[in-house]
Image: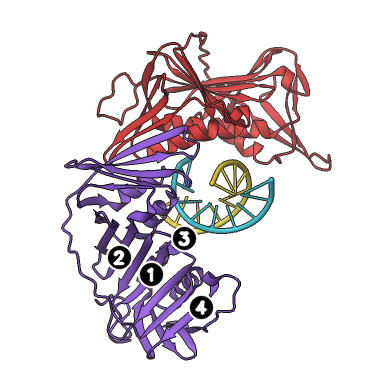
Chain colours: A red, B purple, C yellow, D cyan
DNA sequence: CTGAACCGGT
DNA sequence: ACCGGTTCAG
């Protein structure tokens, strides 16, 4: 028996908005620790990892570990039926092949339940090793989203370089080139507006903007984003989810900056 | 060497929004006087003239006259990457076949540079004679835009007539006719809300609404617009650009008000 | 001016 | 699904 009550239901709505365009079907794994998901995107290039810790739920009951395969598009359709202030409860009976989402309006005068069929999904749960990163950049998530969007009007890939000067986002396309440099800036009113650059070693890596722009769908989840970079390692783009966990996107760098931009490389 | 620093970068963004749909490619001419452009629209019917005087720039360095051919669509793409309160600097080295747009965020913690290829464009720089106009109408630009939009849902051409009564905008179409009369009105809170009609002689001219509606893309540049009319002369629709200059659109009147509305006449 | 919500178009 | 434009509130 599984029953997870999330007071801030809008979090779950935003999580689905953030990943449903990237991943079609995925297993949600539920254990006493929390509610989590790990999945490759449909073209098998990027990886999404979500964690919502059990402590972030008002009630958290999960009698035994369970993996629930869901079609994220359908799940998102159902969650769209929840109000932004609704309390969302996720329920599943042992051995059942369905999951139920229950939405309670804040005033308790509307209660909805939506039942969705589960599906069997081959999950290849990768152990993601904790790595040391050459550089970690934290910046306002809206600024990162704006930069990725702007650059994709010029080119298809972005080179992210971290040096003492700051972090530089560069692209090149038919109509010209673009470079955007953000300097460290901690003298701001609110800590989430800061740009903080931790650099152990300079690093410069190339990524497909298409995926970066997908990742920025998670912007509503957090006002800041953390970008962790190491040569040869996938970049990690992380949005913290207040009090609960995180959503992380992994994307392997393009090995060479060649002119053939069309086929993403793993 | 050319280096023009414009503190209110949004002006340049708005200028491009105003002309990029009318003109594909154009030469920007830079001299010690200012930064200017003159170009026919792609169907060779209307003419755009832009002037940004050097005094309006924070720094203005232009060692020698230079004409820079730009694709306005590409230029507009790049300027869209500037924030609305960014400072924009236009740079070009002597003999270079590129131009660089530099965007500085107000807080200086983000600096972007966009480099764009220049192109060779045959420019037919017309001397536009200063003319005496039979009538000059100044009115709120938003009102003029609204009138042109409204009339184009009825007909394809507008007859603009100035008499002692005021200025009348008329159209006729399959579904009926429309006349909008604006009287002089100077008793307003703000001078830019006034409608001022200077008439030496009554005048009545017919224009294609399609072009008028293009011209009103410049509405964000100025709260008022000036329409100068003389029989047989192209109308001038002018938006002043605060402290810097203007953008003017010229359009020849249609000679007769015939029923064939489809083909614009020069 | 930014952010969110909404809308229509493509 | 994405994008641009618009609007409204903060």
Identify the subunit bearing mark 2.
B
> Mark 2 touching mark 1, by CB under 8 A?
no
Where B249 sits versus A3, above or below?
below
- Binning the other alpha carbons within 10 Å of mark 1 as few (below 14), some (14 to 19) or many (20 upward) gives many
Mark linked to residue B238: 1
Decide which of tag 4 and tag 1 comes sooner along the chain.
Answer: 4
Residue A39, x across and y down, in percent: 52, 21
Mark linked to residue B220: 3
> Mark 4 touching mark 1, by CB under 8 A?
no
Question: For the residues carrying marks 2 and 1, which lies nearer the camera in this image?
Answer: 1
Q: Nearer the viewer, residue A229 or B194?
A: B194
Mark linked to residue B195: 4
Q: What distance separates the C-alpha of mark 2 from that of mark 1?
A: 10 Å
Could you tell me if residue A42 is visible in this image? Answer: yes
Decide which of tag 1 and tag 3 comes sooner along the chain.
Answer: 3
Where A40 sits versus B110, above or below?
above
Where A190 sits versus B197, above or below?
above
Identify the subunit bearing mark 1.
B
Q: Nearer the viewer, residue B122 or B11?
A: B11
Residue B16, x across and y down, in percent: 36, 55
């Amino acid at each position: 028996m599984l029953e997870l009550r999330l007071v801030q239901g809008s979090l779950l709505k935003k999580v689905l908005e953030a990943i449903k365009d990237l991943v079609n079907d995925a297993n949600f794994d539920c254990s006493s620790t929390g509610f989590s998901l790990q999945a490759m995107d449909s073209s098998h290039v990027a990886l999404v990892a979500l964690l919502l810790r059990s402590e972030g739920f008002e009630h958290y009951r999960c009698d035994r570990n369970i993996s629930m395969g869901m079609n994220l598009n359908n799940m998102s359709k159902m969650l769209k039926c929840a109000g932004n202030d609704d309390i969302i409860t996720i329920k599943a009976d042992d051995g059942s092949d369905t999951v139920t989402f229950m939405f309670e309006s804040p005033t308790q005068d509307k209660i909805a339940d939506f039942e969705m069929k589960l599906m069997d999904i081959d999950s290849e749960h990768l152990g993601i090793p904790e790595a040391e990163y050459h550089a970690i950049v934290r910046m306002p998530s809206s600024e990162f989203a704006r930069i990725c969007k702007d650059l994709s009007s010029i080119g298809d890939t972005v080179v992210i370089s971290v040096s003492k000067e700051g972090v530089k986002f560069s692209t090149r396309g038919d109509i010209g080139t673009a470079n955007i440099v953000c300097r460290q800036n901690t003298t701001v009113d609110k800590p989430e507006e800061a740009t903080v650059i931790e650099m152990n070693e300079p690093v410069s890596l190339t990524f497909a903007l298409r995926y970066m722009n997908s990742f920025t769908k998670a912007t509503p989840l957090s006002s800041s984003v953390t970008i962790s970079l190491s040569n040869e390692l996938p970049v990690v783009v992380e949005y913290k989810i207040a009090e609960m966990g995180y959503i992380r996107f992994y994307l392997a760098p393009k090995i060479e900056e060649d002119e053939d931009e069309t086929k993403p490389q793993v």
